[in-house]
Image (cartoon, grey):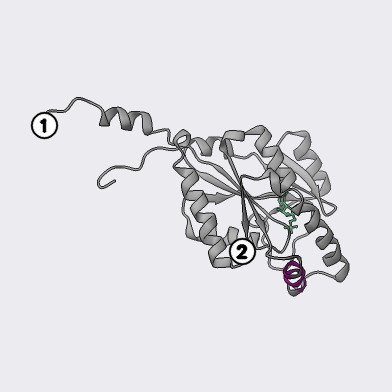
Amino acid sequence: MTGARPLARRGLMFILSSPSGAGKTTIAHRLLAADGEIRPSVSATTRPPRPGEVDGEDYHFVSDEEFDRMVADHEFYEWAHVFGNRYGTPKAHIRADLKEGVDFLFDIDWQGAQQLRQKDNQDVVSVFLLPPSIEELGRRLRSRGTDSDAVIGARMARAQDEISHWDGYDYVVVNDDIDACFTTVREILEAERIKRMRQTGLIDFVRDLMKPVNL
Ligand code: 5GP
């Protein structure tokens, strides 16, 4: 498209889900670092911060009471119970920014993905990452070293439950190799961006291509 301005397009809601330990956080961070057109949707949670997590960046860490208030004031697109804590996607400016062509990345579970799809089917693109094997998943969960055995055991059970929801997603990628997985996820994002229905500038662009010309 030499010399042409990029066509206006509608943004999309890019959901990445996976069982804990399948690489979702790594892929999400790489995507945000590599791609200037996508922003993270920062969830609110009642779980306490882990070492190194930053309030307002990783999550908005809120009290139970504050979470209750946000639910009552309809401040969430969706929210769910996960591992005994609550997590929710604040609406904030998402709708308005989508219109302006901004994409949002959601690191949420299958319950969130399902709720977002019910609310805004057209804008949602969902990707589910799977580990290459259950043994590898166990190894990855243990090697983190941040949680106790009891927590790891609960996460393993939860991971298998999460895996059972694979068929609610648009795309399923097996994360055997992190670089290959990242490339695939980027390709999905790029292809979804140029879907005809998202390219709101196309009508005028094509009209211009079809105007009478004197050669
Ligand atoms: P973690 O506590 O390990 O950061 O996240 C636990 C799980 O909660 C992950 O599967 C993550 O995707 C999910 N999660 C994080 N934020 C949200 C949210 O806003 N909504 C929903 N439904 N799930 C979330």
x%, y% of residue 180? 54, 64
Check disc 1: other Cα within 10 Å, few if <14, some if 14-19, many if 20+: few
Could you say where residue 55 lies in the image, as x and y percent from the top left? Answer: 68, 57
Q: What stretch is highlighted in magenta?
A: 136-142
Q: Which of pointers 1 and 2 indicates the residue nearer the eye?
A: 1
Q: Residue at 75%, 44% (x, y): give it.
A: 111
Q: Where is residue 11 in the image (x, y as percent from the top left)?
A: 50, 40
Amino acid type of the residue that numbered disc 2 sits on in the rendered structure: Thr
Residue drawn at (85%, 61%) of the image: 154
Kindly identify the residue that appears in the image at 35 percent across and 43 percent down: 6
User: Hey, which quadrant is residue 174 in on the image?
Assistant: bottom right
Label the magenta part by its dominant secondary structure: helix
Q: In this view, does 121 lie above or below 173?
A: above
- Lateral position of residue 19 relative to residue 91, left or right: right
Q: Inspect the image, locate mark 1, and give the three-letter code of the amino acid beneath it.
A: Leu
Q: Which of 31 and 191 is in front in this view?
A: 191
Quarter of the image for the C terminus: give it.
top left
Residue furthest right as drawn: 150
Q: How far apart are marks 1 and 2 (CA)?
A: 53 Å
Counting the numbered discs, the total is: 2
Residue at (75%, 54%) from the top-left corner?
163
Q: Does the magenta stretch include residue 139?
A: yes
Residue 212 seen in the current view: yes
- Is 215 placed left or right of 162 in the picture? left
The label on residue 96 is none
Residue labelled with disc 1: 215
SS under mark 1: loop
Task: Respond yes or no on whether mark 1 lies under 8 Å from ligand 1.
Answer: no
User: Mark 1–mark 2 contact, CB under 8 Å?
Assistant: no
Q: Does the magenta stretch include residue 193?
A: no
Image: 3 above or below 21: above
In the rendered image, which residue does mark 2 sit on?
26
